[in-house]
Amino acid sequence: MTSALSAFTRSIDHPSFLQALGHKQNLLIIQDLDGVCMGLVRDPKRRTMDADYIRAVRAMAGQFYVLTNGEHIGSRGVNPIVEAAFATQPSGWVQQQGLYLPGLAAGGVQWQGCDGDLDHPGVSAQEMAFLKAVPDTMHRYLSARLSEPPFALSPQQVAEVLDVIVLDNLVSPTLNIGSLHDRFGAHYPAMQRVAAELMEALLQQAAEQGLEDSFFVHLAPNLGTQNGRERLKPAAGSDMGTTDFQFMLRGAVKEAGVLVLLNRYYFARCGEYPLGEDFSVRVAPRSADAMRALAESAFDPALMPSVVGVGDTVTSVVDNDDATVFSRGGSDRGFLTLVQQLGESFHSDNAVVWVDSSGGELNRPGLSPQHTDPSQPVPLTSLQGITDEYDPLQLNLLFAGGYQQYIAFFRQLASLRQTTA
């Protein structure tokens, strides 16, 4: 059995990987949420989370952070989901027990500890005021467009649709149009275009208020970036393409969040912030190379943990004219790639874990056909639409059984780490 996490290659040998994790002296898991520890659903208000998984997160205190483009708070936030998992307990019990998921939300601009204490480092009052008005702008814009052809919805239908697709997140207001894929059918690509036009209108409004450098639009899933902007993934048949259009604060990208979380990890270990106490994603370098260089210059290699990045949204789409050219994207690709690169820089034996979320309500590429031999890497032919033979991002461990299989593994890990501590 290998003890090196990075030596696993597209593996489904979970027991061996679990044992390798159990023997790591210093470990930090950085994990996405939707599709990883809970199922993908078209209406975020219907998400649920396993109570035992939440308890396992608490048991991994100091070794685990979340990193999500969703938010901790609000009607569609993660905190209400955590509270619902313990609905039989009295009000305030979750906070008293420290069961909120610690880490970064909204792409990295919303920090929360396990007790629910919340902060938005680096965000100005003017930016917060603009974001507060975005959901109302979305409602006005979409009410007009959805009442027109090709949608031609009645006022009641428009209200019902907007109640589902407009996510009034505090610092990352979002359109989640996946629920309209079946309803709109052939008109769904038109809805993607409407959503993209709305995001452009919001960026223009921000610029007119002197906030031209404050925001960007995050698309999930996407086809990577071009000219500094994320590329929309068009719907194709059962593939919904881009479903989430998030209006986000500039700098709120997950890879920058990795640096913030490591900065906090080091403080917990040695009492000092290598990047400074006020370091946030708002002041982090913009390029991946600069982020890696900053980490190399600031973090003590002797204290660097083995970092395991866990995500589900990674895409790779081959060019129709050249089989060696791929458009690679996905909202988890950036942070998983940085985790891999830091492992190379610090020789810290990092790993990338991918969870198959294709079994949820949103049509995503998944592992097909199923691979059942843990002694052999999953062939790349089974991962079309996710990775490719030229992909610099190497997936070390795969969970073909989706979030259910992953959370069972995570509970085992928490138990093992407590036993071996």
Image: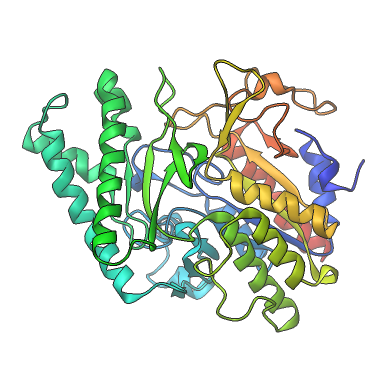
Toward the bottom, the furthest residue is: 271
415 vs 298, nearest the viewer: 298
**Taking 405 as reference, is 185 above or below it?**
above
* The C terminus, quarter of image: bottom right
Seen at 7% across and 32% down, the residue is 154
Query: Looking at the rendering, which quadrant does residue 316 occupy?
Result: top right
Q: Position of residue 177 (x, y in %)?
A: 32, 37
Furthest residue in direction left, as rendered: 155
The answer to which of 302 and 52 lies nearer the viewer is: 302
Q: Is residue 277 above or below residue 390?
A: below
| Place of residue 413 in the rendered image (x, y in percent of width and height, measured from the top left) | 73, 52
Residue at the image position 58 percent from the left and 63 percent from the top: 285
**Residue closest to the eye, 205 or 244:** 205
Residues 55 and 397: in front is 397
Left or right, 269 with reference to 56 = right
Please say if 354 is above or below 86: above
Q: Residue furthest right?
A: 1
Furthest-front residue in this view: 227
- Visible residue check, residue 182: yes
Tell me the quarter of the image containing the N terminus. top right
